[in-house]
């Protein structure tokens, strides 16, 4: 294994479902505090790549490193489970469909993992939940169940739930795609706030404006490869590849 | 010989004792069938092959043979290999395991119906699969399964009459004993039926309470 110095280091990621190749030799590095956006049409492999980072969709080839530790290393099953659970505690993930636990209040959604995995007392966990929910502007709804919340509120609670584990890295898998347009902004605000706090983030998104405003770097993926990457002002204004131009043009038309 | 319900009060103590046994056995067996149902369901869905196979055999035996035979086997059969259970314990185990197998089928279906994203979200936080099942998936599955399990529990109550054949003085056997002394089968069977009906109503009431409680917390 070679020495590595990048915070997130994806090397030659490859993923196939049977004969279908979803990721074709993708390499990507992210430094601490960086915010990287991944754009591309559905089926381009962007979510699969994101989900490979915490091994939710294990790669069929290549390596994922986080802060000097290989995430997808080869270990006997039991040891691997232990290893991956420890890795995942360091990586927060936010899903398109929120995936809040419907039988728990917002508070319980946030406190469950810290209490189970970090041994926090009820009191300490409650304090943590209040802090985190306050941060996403959901303190007033702390004892509401997910069914009593709007989509934007649910997603904010889901972000608080992830933050409560004090992750080093946050992954956003189309966090606003399932929201009604008027609810997108409140979630974007929370993500912007995290950006200001220099949280390292990888954001899969369909929202070019948002990507342009928060990301340090944007990747355009198509058919399992990174077609082009660069700072948002370059990638969005002066893309060098035809496929990127085509995608952005179509996307712009769709947005109208 | 006409009907004469006036003799009932003289034997009411026997009958009420029978009611108590029926309720007790039903509750204990229901608890066992529920806990066993969850365990069987988790084994059926997640355990390695070598553990799954013996449980499939248990499932096959309890679903494919008469409950009466199962009770005989547990009460009379196990003695031969040195396991001498009191009749009521044998009855609870027999009824409990029999219905655990049926509950397991329901719970398996409802575990599989829990959205995949729930397991993913839990795993992403760092929970092991076991922890995720215990805290996230199973609690949701169990909530969804309360109404059909309630139906099974009413069947369990009715089938609890079968433990009378291994000598547990539950409601049906108590009625028979009263009849043995009075030769008044109609009166006492009707009385027993009325008690079964009342217990049934109580169970439905409890079930509705539970359903309402858990539906609020969703």
Image (spheres, coloured by chain):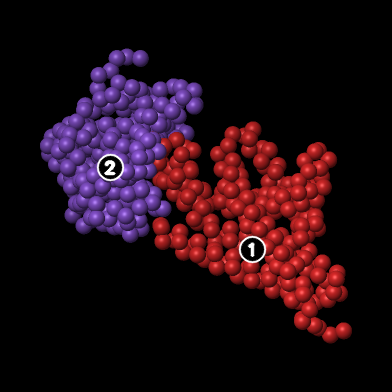
Chain colours: A purple, B red
Q: Residue at x 41, y 26 (%)?
A: A83
Chain on which label 2 sits: A
Callout 2: few (<14), some (14-19), or many (20+) C-alpha neighbours within 10 Å? many
Dot 1: few (<14), some (14–19), or many (≥20) neighbours within 10 Å?
Answer: some
Q: Secondary structure at mark 1?
A: helix
User: In the image, residue B172 lies at what x, y percent?
Assistant: 76, 65
Asked whether B80 or A216 is in front, the reply is: B80
Chain letter of the residue beneath label 1 in the structure image: B
From this viewpoint, is residue A41 visible? no
Q: Residue at x 62, y 60 (%)?
A: B153
Residue closest to the far top: A2
Q: Where is residue A243 shown, x and y percent of the image?
A: 24, 37
Kindly identify the residue that appears in the image at 45 percent across and 61 percent down.
B213
Q: Quadrant of residue B46?
A: top right
Secondary structure under the numbered disc 2 in the rendered image = helix
Q: Which residue is mark 1?
A: B154
- Percent position (x, y) of residue B61? 73, 47
Query: What is the distance, in whole Å, between disc 2 and disc 1 at their CAs?
Result: 45 Å
On the picture, is B13 further left or further right than B179?
Answer: left
Q: Position of residue A239 (x, y in %)?
A: 16, 35
Tell how many labels: 2
Which residue is drawn at the image coordinates 66% and 41% (left, top)? B55
Q: Which residue is mark 2?
A: A128
């Amino acid at each position: 294994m070679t020495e590595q110095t990048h915070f997130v280091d994806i090397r030659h990621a490859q993923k196939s479902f049977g004969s279908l190749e979803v990721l074709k030799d993708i390499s990507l590095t992210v430094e601490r505090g960086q915010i990287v956006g991944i754009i591309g049409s559905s089926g381009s492999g962007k979510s699969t790549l994101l989900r490979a980072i915490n091994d939710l969709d294990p790669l069929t080839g290549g390596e994922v490193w986080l802060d000097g530790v290989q995430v997808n290393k080869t270990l006997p099953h039991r040891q691997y489970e232990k290893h991956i659970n420890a890795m995942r505690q360091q990586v927060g993930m936010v899903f398109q469909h929120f995936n809040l636990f419907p039988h728990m209040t917002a508070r319980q959604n946030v406190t469950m993992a810290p209490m189970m995995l970090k041994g926090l007392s009820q009191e300490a966990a409650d304090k943590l939940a209040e802090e985190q929910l306050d941060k996403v502007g959901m303190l007033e709804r702390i004892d509401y169940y997910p069914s009593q919340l709007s989509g934007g509120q649910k997603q904010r609670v889901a972000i608080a739930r992830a933050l409560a584990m004090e992750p080093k890295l946050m992954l956003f898998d189309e966090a606003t795609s399932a929201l009604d347009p008027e609810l997108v902004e409140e979630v974007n605000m929370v993500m912007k706030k995290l950006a200001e706090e220099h949280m390292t983030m990888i954001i899969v998104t369909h929202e070019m404006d948002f990507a342009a405003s928060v990301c340090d770097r944007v990747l355009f993926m198509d058919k399992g490869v990174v077609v082009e990457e660069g700072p948002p002002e370059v990638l969005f204004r002066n893309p060098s590849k035809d496929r990127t131009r085509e995608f952005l043009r179509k996307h712009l038309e769709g947005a109208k | 010989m006409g009907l004469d319900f006036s003799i009932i009060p003289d034997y009411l103590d026997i009958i009420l004792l029978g009611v108590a046994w029926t309720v007790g056995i039903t509750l204990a067996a229901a608890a066992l069938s529920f806990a066993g149902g969850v365990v069987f369901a988790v084994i059926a869905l997640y355990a390695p092959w070598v553990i799954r196979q013996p449980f499939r055999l248990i499932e096959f035996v309890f679903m494919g043979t008469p409950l009466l035979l199962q009770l005989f086997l547990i009460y009379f059969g196990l003695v031969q290999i040195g396991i001498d259970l009191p009749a009521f314990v044998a009855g609870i185990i027999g009824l409990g395991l029999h219905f655990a197998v049926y509950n397991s089928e329901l719970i398996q279906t409802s575990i599989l119906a829990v959205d995949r994203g729930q397991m993913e979200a839990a795993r992403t936080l760092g929970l092991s699969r076991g922890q995720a099942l215990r805290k996230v998936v199973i609690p949701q599955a169990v909530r969804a399964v309360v109404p059909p399990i309630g139906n099974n529990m009413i069947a369990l109550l009715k089938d609890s009459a079968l433990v009378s054949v291994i000598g547990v003085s539950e409601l049906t056997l108590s009625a028979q004993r009263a009849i043995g002394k009075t030769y008044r089968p109609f009166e006492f069977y009707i009385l027993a039926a009325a008690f079964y009906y009342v217990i049934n109503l109580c169970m439905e009431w409890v079930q509705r309470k539970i359903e309402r409680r858990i539906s609020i917390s969703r």
